[in-house]
Image: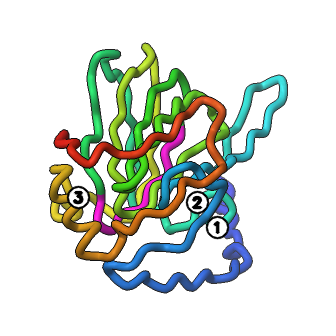
Amino acid sequence: MAEPATVLPPPPSSPVRLVTARPRGTIPPPFGEPTGVRRVSFVELQKIGDARGDLVVAELDKHVPFLVERMYALVNVPSNADRGGHAHKELEQVLVVLSGGFELVVDDGAHRQSIFLDEQTRGVYLRPMVWRELRRFRPGTVCVVLASSVYEEGDYLRDYDSFKAELRARGLDRPSPASSGVHRLSSVYPVDPARRTG
């Protein structure tokens, strides 16, 4: 006869985090180390290692400033492929490269910055209204993207002129000096007003 199953008590209750929704059309506050582009910052993740290998950790409020509702990974991207080429009206994202690397170009409408992401413990936080382009993927690159919302096609701005128009409509097109916190492998340059790519 088998022993009766042991019934374990429920785990002690953990504190409940109350998250208030950000009103649509507003930009969340800065978080992390500034870059040369508004609404873009670096976040340092925690790495814990021993003889068995490494853990790279991202925790809410410490490394990620929003509740993650979606996670996806970019894998098997050919080195000559370009991804991105869009902005989001409301979505927030943190991009983390787990292996390999690629060039991330971010644009706030006034400044563009090229960042080569190849560090497992250094992510990039993209707030809403940032144009992004991903290119020059190394073989074997794996990039994990943590997103504040599920996929919504209506949140995308897939045309650069539409992105600029949305910036104007929201009062986000006013020029400001680029931040001095520029990553060692990046460059900041002003946006060409005649630029018409997307």
97 sits to left or right of 170: right
Residue linked to disc 3 = 163
Residue 47 lies, with reference to residue 29, above or below; the image says above
Q: Position of residue 57 (x, y in %)?
A: 67, 47
Give the percent coordinates (x, y) of residue 109: 34, 55
Residue type, numbered disc 2: Val
Can residue 150 be seen here?
A: yes
* In contact (CB < 8 Å): disc 2 and disc 1: yes
Q: Which residue is denoted by mark 1 in the rendering?
A: 61
SS at circle 2: loop
Give the mark nearer the N terminus: 3 vs 2.
2
- Which mark is drawn over residue 64? 2
CA distance separating discs 2 and 1: 5 Å
Q: Are the residues at dot 3 and dot 1 in contact (C-beta closer than 8 Å)?
A: no
Q: Residue at x 19, y 39 (%)?
A: 197
Query: What stretch of residues is rendered in magenta?
Result: 88-96
Out of 98 and 156, give the one closest to the viewer. Answer: 156
The image shows residue 122, relative to residue 99, as above or below, that is below
Q: Is residue 85 left or right of residue 174?
A: left
Residue 176 belongs to magenta span: no
The amino acid pointed to by label 3 is Phe
Q: Quadrant of residue 56?
A: top right
Amino acid type at circle 1 is Asp
Res 118 quadrant in image: top right
